[in-house]
Amino acid sequence: MDNVNTIPLYGLIGYPLKHSFSPEYFKRKFAGEHIHAQYQAFPLQHIHELPSLLHKHPNLKGLNVTIPHKKTIIPYLDRLHASAENAQAVNCIKIKNGITIGYNTDVYGFTQSLIPLLKPHHTHALILGTGGAAYAVGYALKKLHISFIYVSRKPSLGNISYVDITPEILQKYLLIIQTTPLGMYPDLHAAPQLPYEALTPAHLAYDLIYNPEETLFLQKAKKSGASSKNGLEMLHLQANASWEIWNDRENILTDFY
């Protein structure tokens, strides 16, 4: 029988992690493809716990990173791949010969998921939120030549606040991407404060949340006739990209960063 510390281990860090998709996804992947490895959720409330986690599990080969650590993890890593440097956020870590290398697969997953939904009039976007996922979305939109503005609770240089979003602004910004945890299970009755009645069938509402399948944000957008998309396909795509990276096939990211 294998010593548990010799079996290749992969995992997810973030907080909280009770309803994360990744552990079950990789468990099924490993079983279905007869891969001799394990995947585990590691709830880290504070990012400074990362070094002790790595020390405790020397068989760790890779990690996925989720809220709230996608940006704060950067100083704790030995190197950054160009994908993470460009996106200014990390959601995947490869650990090889004791070296931690940060990657970003959110741009890859988001881009692949978004492109089939885009119409010629989707030239301007609002990105709701300013966290690590929002930065990855922003980089993806730059690559797609879509102008965008970040929206946050407090306006700052280059950002606007939710109260600044008027029906007139929504006439121009026909793509709205929700990157915050608002509406994520179990907080099902929360949604960004927007003039939803100003949305139209020309609008596309995209929510990175996948649990629940349809957030209140998406429900409100659909009620006004907007097209909608949740984050499940993006999650599948970025998870597959993580596996490629952990197996030294980083070229999957070449055309996206």
Image (cartoon, helix red, strand yellow):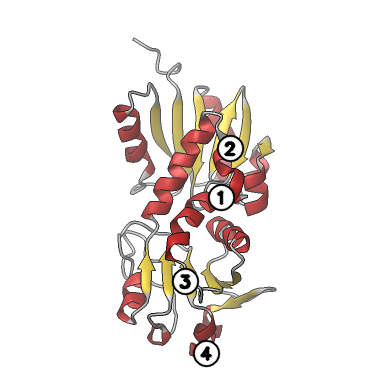
Q: Do the residues bearing badges 1 and 4 touch, measured as CB atoms within 8 Å?
A: no
Of circles 1 and 3, the one toward us is 3
Task: Say what amino acid the circle numbered 4 marks.
Answer: Glu
- Residue under the image location 39 percent in, 34 percent down: 40
Q: Judge from the rendering whether residue 257 lies leftward or rightward of residue 120; answer left or right.
A: right
Which residue in the protein does label 3 denote? 119
Mark 4 residue crowding within 10 angstroms, few (<14) / some (14–19) / many (20+): few
Q: Secondary structure at mark 4?
A: helix
Sequence-first tag of 4 and 2: 4
Q: Secondary structure at mark 2?
A: helix
Sequence-first tag of 1 and 4: 1
Which residue in the protein does label 2 denote? 251
Of circles 2 and 1, the one toward us is 2
Residue 70's disc is 1
Q: Judge from the rendering whether residue 157 lies leftward or rightward of residue 151; answer left or right.
A: right
Q: CA distance from mark 4 to mark 2?
A: 42 Å
Q: CA distance from mark 2 to mark 1?
A: 22 Å
- Residue under the image location 38 percent in, 80 percent down: 201
Q: What is the x, y in percent for residue 93?
A: 56, 37
Does residue 59 appear in this view?
Answer: yes
Sequence-first tag of 4 and 3: 3
Q: What is the x, y in percent for residue 74?
A: 64, 45
Sequence-first tag of 2 and 1: 1
Does residue 88 appear in this view?
Answer: no
Residue 168's disc is 4
Of circles 4 and 3, the one toward us is 3
Q: Judge from the rendering whether residue 25 lies leftward or rightward of residue 155; answer left or right.
A: left
Q: What is the x, y in percent for residue 227?
A: 37, 72
